[in-house]
Amino acid sequence: MTIRLRACEVFGETLIRLQGIHVTYRRWGQSLTALAEVDLEVKAGQWVMIVGHNGSGKSTLLKLIAGQQEATSGWVEINGSPKCGGAGGFDSDLFQVCQDPLLGTADGLTLMENLVVADPSPQGRGPSPRGRRDRYMELLSQFDLAQRANQLLRYFSGGERQQVALIIAKLRNPQILLLDEPLAALDPSRLPMCEQLIASMNAAGSTILQITHDMSTAQTTGHRTIAFEAGRILYDHSGEERSRTTSDLGADVRQAEGGGDKASSRVNR
């Protein structure tokens, strides 16, 4: 079943800009390249799907934008200001949902306590404590989690914690939302509501960069598809041209992940 997701229809000025990005690191005594010669601009309100083989540089890109990774050379600009590597804590303008559902949530706190900690609303202003709790419960009810509001998060499955991370993202309403395979651990029955939640955040104005290995999702969701290969941008397409090129890459990904010399020769072309 295909679900049509309502996305933002009007884009603003350039919000994210990467220029001449190179990222290299050493492993096992060798110098390895994670990103090379990456130039990228993303406008406010865009929903960008990012695809590519494992190890092609997708997650490194999100870490750069989040300030968790420093570039070996080149620069990153967010809203016209340099983004420095190593930034910690909550950024009110940016939120990241990691591939690992254990990151970004506290397993020693209850579900409700996690929402309270993540809520960016200043204390003493805005809704009353009861009003905030009502808002939290409304969000949790959409995911059938209201009855578990007072349960410690350590008792939640990986898929459930991934849903909690998306709920927190909705609560924070970030200007930039970075999603590293946010639906990978979910049961199929939970996918539609989570997809709709992400779409609602984009429709409300969040600029989204989302990594996926689901090629059908990559060619039908959001506004733009960027494919990475060996740390470089292989293509950057929007509109109707996304379908053909993303399908071609999907065939390469399936062959590469299945192994074999033929797959290797195509992936490393």
Image (cartoon, grey):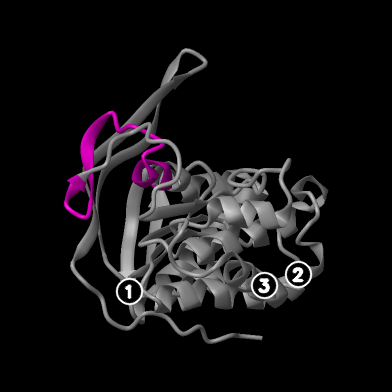
Q: Which one is in front, 245 or 67?
A: 67
Residue 241 vertical position relative to residue 181 in the rendered view, above or below: below
Residue 56 seen in the figure = yes
Q: Which mark is residue 146?
A: 2
Residue 269 seen in the figure = no
Report crowding for label 3: few under 14, some 14 to 19, many 20 or more residues within 10 A (C-alpha). some
Residue 70, image quadrant: top left
Q: Which residue is mark 1?
A: 238
At label 3, which amino acid type do we have?
A: Leu
Who comes first in sequence, dot 3 or dot 1? Answer: 3
Residue 74, image quadrant: top left
Question: Could you give the CA–CA distance between mark 2 and mark 3, rounded to whole angstroms?
Answer: 18 Å
Percent across and percent down for residue 46 are: 33, 70
Question: Could you give the CA–CA distance between mark 2 and mark 1, rounded to whole angstroms?
Answer: 39 Å
Q: Circle 2 — which element?
A: helix
Q: Which residue is mark 3?
A: 191
Q: Circle 1 — which element?
A: strand
Image point 57% across, 56% down: which residue? 181
Q: Which mark is residue 161?
A: none
Who comes first in sequence, dot 2 or dot 3? Answer: 2
The answer to whether the residue labelled 3 contacts the one labelled 1, judged by CB atoms less than 8 Å apart, is: no
Image point 33% across, 60% down: which residue? 235
